Image: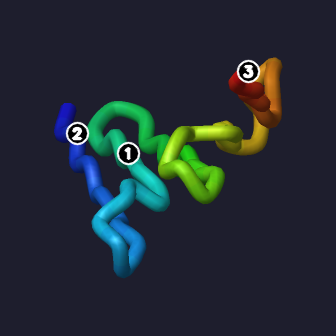
Amino acid sequence: MTVDTDYRYAANGQVASVTTRLSGASDAAGTIGYAYNPLNEVVAIDYPAGCPVATVHYRFN
């Protein structure tokens, strides 16, 4: 089995998305996306289709 991970970055250096691909006996791939607030804190993580939770939102006080 081979695992490849691709990181995509926004212009300001923040991780925008991470894609992981598995190849071998069975192939699979998925992308996780990240959203940030003006303070550069992660406010949402979008998970690949088929995950039990599509998006997780974060709030800061």
Is disc 1 surrounded by few (<14), some (14 to 19) or many (20+) residues within 10 Å?
some
Q: Are marks 2 and 1 in contact (CB under 8 Å)?
A: yes
Q: Residue at x 76, y 43 (%)?
A: 49
The residues tagged by marks 3 and 2 sit, at their Cα atoms, a distance apart of 38 Å
Amino acid type for the residue under numbered disc 1? Thr
Determine which residue is flagged by label 3.
Answer: 61
Quarter of the figure with residue 10? bottom left
Q: 53 or 29: which is nearer to us? A: 53
Is residue 30 in sight in this rendering? Answer: no
- Residue 53 screen position, x and y as percent: 80, 23
> Of circles 2 and 1, which is in front?
1
On the image, the x and y values in percent for residue 2 come to 18, 39
Give the labeled residue for mark 2.
3
Q: Say which quadrant the N terminus sits in.
A: top left
Give SS at disc 3.
Answer: loop
Q: CA distance from mark 2 to mark 1?
A: 7 Å
Q: Residue at x 81, y 34 (%)?
A: 54
Q: Secondary structure beneath disc 1?
A: strand
Up/down of 57 relative to 32, above or below: above
- 3 vs 2, front mark: 3
Q: Is residue 51 left or right of residue 9?
A: right
User: For mark 1, what is the residue?
Assistant: 20
- Which is more N-terminal, label 1 or label 2? 2
Front in this rendered view, residue 31 or 15 = 15
Q: Is residue 30 left or right of residue 23?
A: right
Precedes in sequence: disc 3 or disc 2:
2
Helix, strand or loop at mark 2: strand
